[in-house]
Image: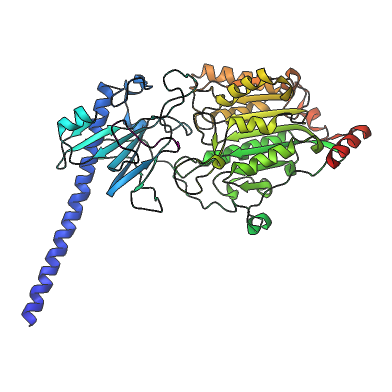
């Protein structure tokens, strides 16, 4: 009996040893296989940059002319056994012309050629199918065949549902977000994509910080509305004896792959500019952020800061602040975060479905509806996000049709309609040039200095501006005179006293 036990024990140890060796071998093979997949794909792209795309699709061959993988970010995912790949675009159900609706795959990987750009920006998605012979892969599936022990076929995903795809120049027909990749049977839709800085010999860009925060108090529950951690702010109910400057600072987030710590840094730096330099009262600066923690913001900023996943909360506050009864002198609206190619700012993927819902984003059309006929004496909109120029274009079109709705507006974007925003370059420059020097600067002059600086430095984005009121553009960010000494500017009252007749008029409006 003892001898039998010894034999069983020996077999158990031997079996465990084999399993351990197998696990190590699988891990090594996995790296080898990923190296083969990515290398074959890169070779194909260098030889044929538009490989795998349908006729008429947008393609920029220059990206692969001098390919350096160390400047690209790599994400990989494998199925257990199959995976699904989901893009934010609700219309996008198929990823290639050679796949069925809601198709599944064995593996997928993503190449991000511009890690320093803010999302959205161009990314390349590749889909892997096992057990496909070379002929079928190359001819029937328009893919690249990789000779592994499984005979793999790699296909290139593309955006198939672009508005007026072939002729409309105001839409970039490209995939511009890291997708949600999850097991096909996983109802929780856990993201499987993992950033990889190196394979066996190929090196890629640093993975950076992948953010993962619980979003506090993003709903309308009593706990959120009454708690100090969230809630929905309310602007003043009616005008008092003075007319003050107000600001709304907004950042999106969407998910852990698109959000960046720099968005909260931007919010904090703009808040300091308005409060310390432009002397906006801290109680009149409200901050909305789509992801992150309050402690990342300034200490005095946190009290009027709110985590949101719905654009509704932001929209309501902006609309109410623009009402005639609110007595706002200068209203500054600052926007940053991830965005769609139509200029829509994305807040939070609340249901983790990976698909944008209407309430999860703030479109340029909605923004213009919220600020039209704004009663503030001056309205400044400063937008630092990819495709922010789409908001300027929408505004130009709207002004041509309804010039009376935007008589007091100055809007500045960090990029033109088809360009990405890079890092915090524009916001840093905007803050710097608004407060440097011995005298105050006009908003228009600040814009001109930034534009010239970007051109001189060969920046990859071009700031845009539209001013419906030249007198507003020729004031500082708080409506004061330009070229005034800082000592004199800071001696001015932060708010303007209203004449009795003006106060009575606003009081009557509030009652109506």
Q: Is residue 352 above or below residue 367?
A: below
- Relative image position of residue 142 (x, y in whole percent): 24, 28
- Relative image position of residue 305 (x, y in whole percent): 65, 46
Q: Residue furthest front?
A: 101
Q: Is residue 24 above or below residue 421?
A: below
Q: Which residues are magenta?
A: 88-100
- Relative image position of residue 55 (x, y in whole percent): 32, 20
Q: Quadrant of the N terminus?
A: bottom left
Residue in the picture at 38% in, 22% down:
58
Secondary structure that dominates the magenta span: loop
Q: Is residue 482 visible?
A: yes
* Quadrant in which residue 221 is drawn: bottom right
Q: Is residue 426 above or below residue 355?
A: above
83 drawn magenta: no
Q: Nearer the viewer, residue 347 or 138?
A: 138
Residue in the picture at 58% in, 44% down:
310
Q: Residue furthest right?
A: 500
Marker count (numbered): 0
92 drawn magenta: yes
* Quadrant in which residue 485 is drawn: top right
Q: Nearer the viewer, residue 329 or 85?
A: 85
- Relative image position of residue 287 (x, y in whole percent): 65, 42
Q: Nearer the viewer, residue 84 or 252?
A: 84
How is the protein colored in the picture? rainbow
Q: Quadrant of the C terminus?
A: top right
Q: Is residue 239 visible?
A: no
- Left or right? Give the position of 200 relative to 287: left
- Left or right? Give the position of 84 relative to 510: left
- Left or right? Give the position of 6 relative to 475: left
């Amino acid at each position: 009996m003892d001898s039998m036990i010894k034999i069983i024990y020996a077999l158990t140890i031997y079996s465990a040893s084999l399993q351990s060796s197998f696990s190590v071998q699988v891990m090594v093979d996995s790296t080898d296989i990923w190296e083969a997949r990515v290398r074959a794909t890169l070779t194909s792209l260098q030889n044929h940059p538009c490989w795998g795309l349908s006729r008429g699709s947008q393609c920029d061959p220059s990206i692969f002319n001098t390919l350096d993988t160390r400047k690209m970010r790599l994400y990989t995912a494998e199925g257990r056994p199959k995976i699904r790949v989901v893009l934010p675009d609700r219309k996008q159900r198929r990823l290639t012309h050679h796949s069925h609706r809601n198709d599944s795959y064995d593996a997928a990987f993503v190449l991000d050629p511009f890690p320093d750009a803010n999302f959205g920006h161009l990314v390349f998605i590749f889909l892997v199918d096992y057990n496909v012979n070379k002929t079928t892969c190359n001819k029937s599936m328009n893919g690249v065949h990789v000779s592994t022990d499984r005979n793999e076929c790699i296909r290139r995903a593309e955006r198939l549902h672009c508005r007026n795809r072939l002729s409309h120049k105001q839409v970039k027909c490209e995939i511009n977000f890291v997708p949600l990749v999850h097991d096909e049977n996983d109802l929780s839709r856990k993201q499987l994509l993992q950033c990889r800085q190196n394979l066996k010999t190929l090196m890629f860009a640093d993975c950076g910080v992948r953010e993962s925060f619980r979003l506090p108090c993003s709903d309308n529950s009593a706990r959120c509305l009454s708690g100090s951690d969230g809630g929905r702010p309310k602007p003043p109910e009616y005008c008092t004896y003075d007319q003050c400057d107000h600001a709304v600072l907004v950042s999106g987030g969407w998910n852990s792959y698109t959000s960046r710590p720099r968005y909260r840094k931007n919010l904090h730096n703009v808040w300091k500019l308005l409060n310390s330099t432009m002397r906006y009262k801290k109680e009149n600066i409200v901050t909305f952020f789509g992801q992150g923690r309050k402690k990342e913001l300034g200490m005095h900023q946190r009290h009027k800061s709110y985590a949101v996943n719905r654009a509704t909360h932001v929209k309501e506050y902006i609309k109410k602040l623009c009402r005639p009864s609110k007595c706002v002198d200068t209203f500054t609206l600052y926007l940053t975060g991830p965005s769609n190619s139509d200029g829509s700012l994305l807040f939070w993927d609340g249901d983790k479905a990976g698909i944008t819902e209407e309430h999860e984003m703030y479109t340029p059309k909605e923004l213009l509806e919220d600020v039209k006929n704004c009663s503030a004496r001056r309205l400044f909109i400063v937008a630092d996000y990819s495709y922010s120029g789409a908001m300027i274009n929408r505004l130009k079109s709207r002004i041509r049709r309804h010039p009376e709705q935007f008589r007091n507006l100055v809007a500045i974007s960090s990029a033109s309609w088809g360009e990405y925003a890079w890092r915090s370059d524009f916001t840093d420059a905007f803050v710097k040039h608004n407060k440097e020097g011995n005298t105050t600067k006009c908003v228009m002059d600040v814009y001109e200095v930034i534009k010239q600086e970007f051109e001189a430095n060969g920046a990859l984005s071009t700031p845009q501006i539209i001013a419906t009121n030249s007198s507003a553009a020729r004031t500082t960010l708080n409506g004061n005179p330009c070229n005034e000494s800082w000592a004199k500017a800071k001696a001015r009252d932060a708010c303007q006293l209203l004449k009795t007749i003006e106060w009575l008029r606003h009081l009557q409006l509030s009652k109506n």
